[in-house]
Structures are given as structure tokens and as C-alpha cells.
Amino acid sequence: MGNEEKKPKINLAIYWGAACGGCCVSVLDVHESLFDVVAAADLVFWPIALDIKYKDVEAMPDGFIDVTLFNGAVRNSENEYMAKLLRKKTKILVAYGSCSHMGGIPGLANFSDKESLLQRVFDDTESTENPKKIRPQTEYEVKEGVLDLPEFYNDVKTLDQVVNVDYYLPGCPPQTERLVEVFMAIVTGAELPPPGSVVGALVKSQCDECERKKSDNKKINKFYRPWEIEDDGETCFLEQGVICLGPATRGGCGVRCIKGNAPCRGCYGPPPDVIDPGAKMMSAIATMIDSDDPEEIAAIVEQIDDPAGLFYRFSLPSSILRRTIK
Amino acid sequence: MEETRIGLYVCWCGTNIAKMVDVENVAKEMESMPNVVVSKDYKYMCSDPGQDLIIKDIKEHNLNRVVVSACSPRIHELTFRKALENAGLNPYMFEMANIREHDSWVHTDREEATRKAKTLIAGALNRVRWHESLEKRTVDMNPATLIIGGGIAGISAALEIADSGKKVYLIEKSDKLGGHLLNVDLTYPYMYSAQEMIKPKIDRIENNPDIDIFLNTQIEDLTGYVGNFQTKISQDGAEKELKFGSIIVATGLRAFNPDSIKDYDYANFPNVITSVEFEAMLKSGKILTKEGKEPKNISIIHCVGSRNHDYHEYCSRTCCMTALKYSNQIRSALPDSHIYHAYADMRAFGKGCEELYTKTSGKDVIFLMYDQKNDLPKIKKASVKDKCEMLIELNEKLSGESVEVAADMVILMVAMESNDNAKTLGQTVGVSLCGNEFYIEKHPKLDPVATTTDGVYVVGSCQSPKDIPDSVSQARAAAARILAKINYGTVEVEVTTAVVNEELCCGCQTCVCVCPYTAISYDEEKNVSVVNEVLCKGCGTCGSACPTGAIKCRHYTDQQILSQIEGLLSKSLELQEV
């Protein structure tokens, strides 16, 4: 308790937008380090763990929260409201995890639009029975008064498409060790990188840390999904015809997927100079196809299942692929 | 960072642009774009006064970027870069918006074309702000030259270069020098003996200490760049390495095989022969049928494999005159014979050629015109009563009548086509093929011997079918180009090269094998790729292959290109809304 008197505690908030909950769990994964965290910070808002209401946040003075870890994308009006509110109340706003960083898995919905999504869910799915064609509405009057629901948006947005973001801590979810490092840097008053930086990740991409054998022999005649091939456990996935997004993805996770014999899916996002990692990776893959014959090339490319979902799994809303804004 | 100050110049190109684009309105409106300090329109930006306008403004308004919207950068980018240089600005601080080929020439609605000009300029303005200064680099020129092919073209070039005391490596795949000319008897139109022309040249080559001849030799591979090439050659299985600064490709062509034309039945009629076989017959001194008899009726069929979409669309250029030459030689050897030409058009351009046609026409030679595109003659076996071996049936175009011609010998004037290894060799030396599989020159009119690979020249019939004077002219032109470069001593190399940011490169090696110039290697110790900037031609392949964004292609960075697209699209959107 002596520590507490020496150094004032910081106010920490953790919030989720359109998220799966994994990011919040990754915070819990600090295990015994939680004691260090709580020793250094007061958790002033964390819906998954603490019963603090929105109105409590609204009541906080501006800049009251020192650090907010915002995970999840911005998918509806509630997410947007909270992003703006927390921005106002927070000194250092961190986009925590792939969804707030790049749009993440929920961002794949941007390949579709609001109407077709609602139609699928409320009309078409095999298990739907909705003869009255009821759709969610933002307001509904009942005898007790008006009930309201957040408005579902046409686009999934990244956090920085809605508010200014100070730092990005990538990953799906971010590696807990990286979170602790960043957190401790903040609370100990270490010099922080310039605003807008990606923290808790490396500059070089995955291959730099990956221990698999790599050569310049990246010639692909056939693409395999991981289950279709017996991985030799030591050769670069790409050289075995398995698409690995490692080269277009920042290191920092400790090449965990690859060490587990699964190709990198790209959750740590692009290295510093890459604007659109999906495009970069497709462009790279295109050069690896081992044929000069247009028909054969087309046939080889056909073997890639769901290329949009594969190359833009985590990065669609942040990519340069956008639907026309009407 | 210094403030971006852009000068924008909108060219009228006389009426070329001005008639379809409201250039004055464009210049006026674009003046309000961010960072544009001056915006002017002028009749001819490429003229001296046009360039002076830019130079004056750069000095007066302290400009550090220039955009000229005019014709294609292929035509005048260098002109304007030079102007920037003259004004003391780095030449790469320049961008061109093509509002002629991409706009005024291809549109018919003035309003839309004007809008498009603004959009293209907005893209250029957005791009130029990201331009960086690039410095020119030069390397020493190796004064030796490699010549591939020992025919008349290769021989002429070799002598021209060696006569000025420079080293030549002359490579020939067969066992002797001379090429197709070795099999030719007399040459049209003046009936000079081919052997008397070629033999003394071969003697001179063999005795010239500056020419190293490699017979029975193939090129295995080629690396390097203008001024500093090297190759591995294999001569009778033995390998050797050569270093040189320039390359002349003079690999010639081959004769078309007429087997595929069914109506001529070349495979089965013993006395249907090709022009190549007839030339050999002339050279041996006796015109005889396979049975050893003097033929009484000789027919010459033109355009065999040429000018027909089933075979080759192009004209093989030399066959008409060679056929006339045959008539004269046959008439001398067999004064009583009947000579028929089944021809399509008589192509007698060139010095002395029309005269040869006139002269031949007066020698009791019959010309029958046929439709080479749709209605080829047919060769049939004659019956006993015809008193000849074969009959040629054709629809004579001028008279409109079907005629039958007796023939004891038929000469097929076969097309000239590219060698079967043209593609492989082209890939090795970095020269592309045209649609007819001949090598492509850099510019069909203004640069007919150079290629898009600096330091590599194509001469003679490997570039397109040609006669001897044209082949010799090309060979000597290429030699002159090379000697000029050798004389200068150094060559400028590409500055818009690729560069690896070692801080970002993760060593995935995706780039290594995509480089067509073998300019990229992998440094195992540092775990990064390395670009040899002297070998790099700035093609950009590695930049688009690099998944980490570590490779930057100078002057074509992602940021420059995306900014251009952004400028273009936002202007387009803005103008639509108006």
C-alpha cells in the first residue's frame, strides 16, 4: 500500500464496441499481473466485469479517464456514442485489438450492406419464422413508454474512422504480455511514442521471427487449405502452397499461430508502410503463381477459397476497398 | 518541410488540345487548387518560349514542383525535365498530365473533355507533392560488343565496329559465317554475285584481330545492363564467359515450310520446289527437273505463306524481286522455256527494282494475277494428253477468267518467318516479339535499331523480312550507335530504381525470383533482400510483389500513386456534383 502514496493511481477504462469479448478476456489473462494493474490503476469503467453505467461515465469530468482500451468496431449508434463519449472523457484512447484497429471480423460485413444483412437474418435463414416480417426498430412504443434500440449502421467502421485515436494495440486478441508492457510503460511514465503509433507490436513482419525455412523458391502450382496438406512443420507455408499472411503482417504476437502449425491470418495488421495489407498480400501471391498461361493462372487462382475473406479477414473497413458512399 | 509551391501549365498544343478542351478555363479554375502558385495556359509548352516560361516562373515564384498538362509523357517528359534542370530544380519534381492522347484526341464533347482535363490535372497535382529529388548515376562503358548471328547483318556490324579498333565477339550457331547469303547465287536488281560480296567480308573478319569468332556457339544466359553485360556461351559443349557493353542481335530468319498449303501438295509433287531449293539449283549452274530433264514450262507462285491470314499476314518483301530475278536467270539458261508468274501484286519499290520489273516484262514472261487472300491457285497432276507434268488452275483477277497453265516445274516463293528460337533468345537478351514474332524495335520510325532494353540492338531480318541493303544499313546504324556510346565512355543508368528499407524487410524473399533483371539477392546474414541498383531498371515488379511494403520503387511509390488516384477521384466527384 506504500506504493500507492508515492504514485497516484491512474484511471483505466475498458470498453467493447462490436466485439466478441475476446479482447476483454485477454485483459483478464494478465493473471497474477492483475495485482500490478490494480495497484497502479483504478478501473473506472469495464462493462464485462464491473457494474458501472453509461450515466456514470457521462457524469465524469472531461479527461477524467487516463487510459481507455476500446475494443470492438463501430457497428451501431451505441458504439459510436460510446466512442465519442469515451474520447471526451479520456486522455489516452487506445484502439485495442483488431476490430477497433482495422474493423476485424465484424468488418467482413462490409462486403454486404445493411439491408441484405437484415434480410438474411430476419427473413431468409433456414431457421427463421417471421411471417409478419418484423424487423428491429430503433424505437417502439409500449404502454409503459418508448423502448429504444441502437441504430444498426450500413458500414462497420474502425475506431479511428469515428474519433481520434492515440495508440493502436493490434491483435485478435492482443497478446496479454504486450498489453502488460504497454500498460506498465504508461503507468511508470516512460516516454511514449508519438500519437498515432502502433504499440505492443514489432516493426518487421512475422517472417522475421518465424523459424520456418524460407527460400526464394516461392512458386505455387496449387493452393492448399491447411487441412488439405500434410505440413512438414519446417518449410515456409507459402512454399508449400498454403496461404500465410505472415509477410504482410506485423510481428509481435510471437508467431503463435505459425508455431502452432497454422498459417498467419493477419490479425496484427500491416507493417508501417503498408496501406492495404490485403492488396499487398494478393499482389505478392500473384507473383508466386508458377505459370505464364492465362487460363492455367485463372484455374490456379480459382483454388483460393473466399479470397476476399482470406486476404481482408481483419482489415476490410480500414482497407482502400470501399463501397460507393451514397 | 519546405512549403510545396507548384507551377501548373496547360498546353493548347495548337488546336490539338484547345479545340476540345477549354484550356483557358482549366488554367483559371485549377489555380485555386492547394499549393498551386501559378497556373498558365500557352500555345505550345514544348516550344522554346514555352519552356522559358517555366524556367522564368521557377525562378520568379520560387516554385519547387511543376505540372505540365499537355501530350503523352512519352513524347515530352524529358523535354520538361530538362527545363526544370535548366532552372536549377531537380528534374524529378515534375509530373505530366496527358490531356491530349488521353483526352482531347479521344473525346467529342468539349464540356466533358474539359472536365476530364481538370480531373487528370488534379491527380497530377496531388501526386507531384510527394515527388522526391533523384540523382542521376553513370557507369563506365565496356567498349566490347557482342554480335549474335554471323549473316550479312552481323558481319557488316562486326566489321564496322572492329574497323574502329573496338573489340567484337561474333557468335554464330552454325559451323560457318555468311548466313543465308551463302546459298544465294545472284542478287537482284543488278545481278551481283552474292558469293563475290560475302566471301571477301568473311576473309576480312577472319583476319581482323579485334573480332573473336565463335562458331557452333549458343548463348546460355545473359546478365548485366548497358555498358556492362556478361554472358555464358557454350561452344561445342565447352562453356566460356564474355564481358561486353553492347549487344547486336542479328539472328536473321528462316524460310516458310509450304507443306501446310494443301493445294500446292509440295510434299508429293517432286517438281514443286521452294525458292530456297531453286536458288541452290541456280548456284549449282543447272536448272533441271527431278528426272534430270530441262523443264519446258516453269511457273513461279508468289506470296506462298505471305499476306494470307491462314499463314502470315505480312509481306515478306523480297520475294517479288527474287521471282523477277529468277525469270531473267531462267530466260538466259533456257531461252525457249515458257515462264509464268502467278502473283498477287508486284511489289517493286526500292532502287532499281521497278526497272527490273519493266525489263523482265519485256522478256516474254507471262504474269497472271490471283487473289492471295481468298483464292489461291491449285496445282494438279496433268494427264498424258497435256504433254506436261502438272497443271496450275487459277482465277485470273485482271481478266476475270479461269486459266490453266502447264508446268514442268513450279517454284514456290516461300515467305520469310522468324526463327524458331526467336522467343527464347529474345527472353535471354531482353527483347520482345511483335505479333508476327519478329523482334520489336524501340520506335518503328524514329528508333528502328534500338530496343526497349538499353544497349541491345536488333538488325537485319530478325526484326522483319528485309533485303541486303536494308540489313546492311541497319547493321551499320547500330554499329554507329554503339561506337557513339563507347566514345562517350560512360552510360547513364536508371534512377527510378527499387530500394529496400532494411528496417522493414522481413526476409520472406518473395521479391528475389520476380526480378527480370536478376537485380535482387538475399543477404542471409542480415535476413533482408538487397537490390543492385545498377542492374535495376525500375520496372516495379518487386515493389508490387513485396508484401511488407519494404521495397519502394522510386518515383512510383504507393503514396505517389494512391495520392494521384485520390486527387483524380475527388476532383471527379466534385465536378459531378456541380
Image (cartoon, coloured by chain):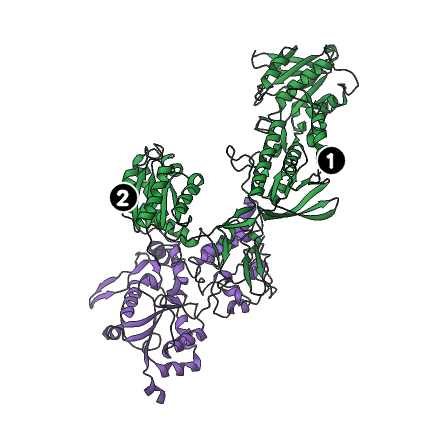
Question: Secondary structure under badge 2?
Answer: helix
Question: Left or right: B530 with respect to B410?
Answer: left
| Chain at tag 1 | B
Task: Please tell me in which quadrant of the rendered image residue B267 appears.
Answer: top right
Looking at the rendered structure, which numbered label has been put on residue B323?
A: none
State which mark lies toward you, 1 or 2. 1
**Gap in angstroms between the C-alphas marked 1 and 2:** 69 Å
The x, y position of residue A206, in whole percent, is: 51, 65
Q: Nearer the viewer, residue A37 or A230?
A: A37
Question: Secondary structure under badge 1?
Answer: loop
Question: Left or right: B61 with respect to A107?
Answer: left
Q: Can residue A236 be seen in this view?
A: yes
| Chain at tag 2 | B
Q: Of marks 1 and 2, which one's residue comes earlier in the chain?
A: 2
Q: Kindly indicate which chain is depicted in green in the rendered structure.
A: B
> Which kind of residue does numbered mark 1 sit on?
Lys
Residue visible at 72% across and 11% down in the picture? B335
The answer to whether marks 1 and 2 mark residues whose Cβ atoms lie closer than 8 Å is no
> Mark 2 = which residue?
B29
Q: Nearer the viewer, residue A131 or B384?
A: B384
The x, y position of residue B442, in whole percent, is: 53, 38
Question: Left or right: A271 with respect to B254?
Answer: left
Q: Kindly indicate which chain is depicted in purple in the rendered structure.
A: A
Q: Is residue A74 visible?
A: no
> Mark 1 = which residue?
B176
Q: What is the residue that sits farthest to the bottom in this orientation?
A: A2
Q: Could you confirm whether marks 1 and 2 are on the same chain?
A: yes
Residue B536 in the image: above or below residue A142: above
